[in-house]
Image (spheres, helix red, strand yellow):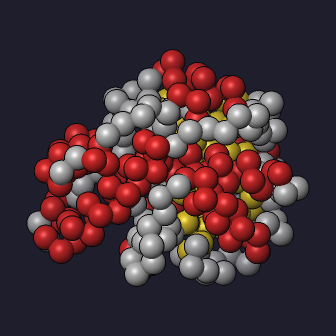
Amino acid sequence: MNTPWYRCFAPRPEARMRLLCFPHGGGSASAYRDWPALLPGTVEVHAVQYPGHADRIGEPLHTDLHLLADAAADAARPLLGKPFALYGHSLGALVAYETALRLEAAGHRPVRLVVSGMPPPHRVRPGTVHLADDAGLLAELRRLGGLPHEVAAHPDLLAMVLRTARADYALGERYRQRTGARLSAPVTVHRATGDPELTAEEAAQWAGVTDGEVRWQTFPGGHFHLAEEPAPVLLDVLADLVSDTSVGWQG
């Protein structure tokens, strides 16, 4: 099932679980294109395509993360006929968290939320990266290792990436958690040892967002470790799904 919001690159009608994946700032659904090949046939991946990104470039970019999560939750409803989990990296971790809150409030509890590379909602750092000129924004993307060489070499493509990245930085830097919000679903927190965006102390504070069980996992690498070495990340995600549901290791 493909919709403007959720892209399924490898449909699996017999899957027992759906994994909803939320991209990093400036990213698109294609960040998760290769994930189905690393997961068993019991798991079907649905990657979020934010408005204004990739093939939705003609649509307005969101300027309020809460409204973005409202829309993502509404669009997810056709996918909730099976057990589901959410995964989000960097900005996607915040969007996944806020989407999970809305789905729980509507009676759809995820089996798990997996967040990566982002402080918890109450510890998100205000910032001004979104106000920087193009050179400053480009320097920030390079610092995090989030700018492929092939993108930097094509001015038109680079301009599109900077446009979406700037808007997404604004989403994160202006975000504020609403009081009283709390999950009941279990949460797993992923952190890379070389990631400047998430300290061990900040990762520990994700325990405050849920009444459910919280687990932490650390990986080698930097902020975009999951793009460089996705297999360890997916093995850990799958271990959670196996323990939370009847999803098996064999596809």
Query: Is 244 placed left or right of 226 in the picture?
Result: right
Foreground: 38 or 158? 158
Residue at x 68%, y 71% (from the top left corner): 75
> Where does the image place residue 98, in percent across and percent down from the top left?
65, 49
Quarter occupied by residue 139: top left
State which quarter of the image contains the C terminus. Answer: bottom right
Q: Is residue 174 above or below residue 211?
A: below
Counting labels gives 0
Residue furthest to the right: 107
Q: Is residue 245 left or right of residue 124?
A: right
Front position in the image: 244 or 116 = 116
Q: Measured from the top left, where is residue 242 in percent x and y?
A: 74, 47
Q: Position of residue 92 (x, y in %)?
A: 51, 51
**Residue 38 appears in the figure:** no
Q: Is residue 148 left or right of residue 181?
A: left
Q: Residue at left 48%, top 37%? A: 118
At 29% from the left edge and 64% from the top edge, which residue is drawn? 163
| Image quadrant containing the N terminus | bottom right
Q: Is residue 159 above or below residue 186?
A: below
Position of residue 87 measured from the top left corner of the image (x, y, whole percent)? 60, 51
Q: Is residue 141 left or right of residue 234?
A: left
Q: Is residue 244 above or below residue 188?
A: below
Looking at the image, which residue is at 18% across and 51% down? 133
6 vs 140, nearest the viewer: 140
Asked if residue 179 shows in the view, the reply is yes
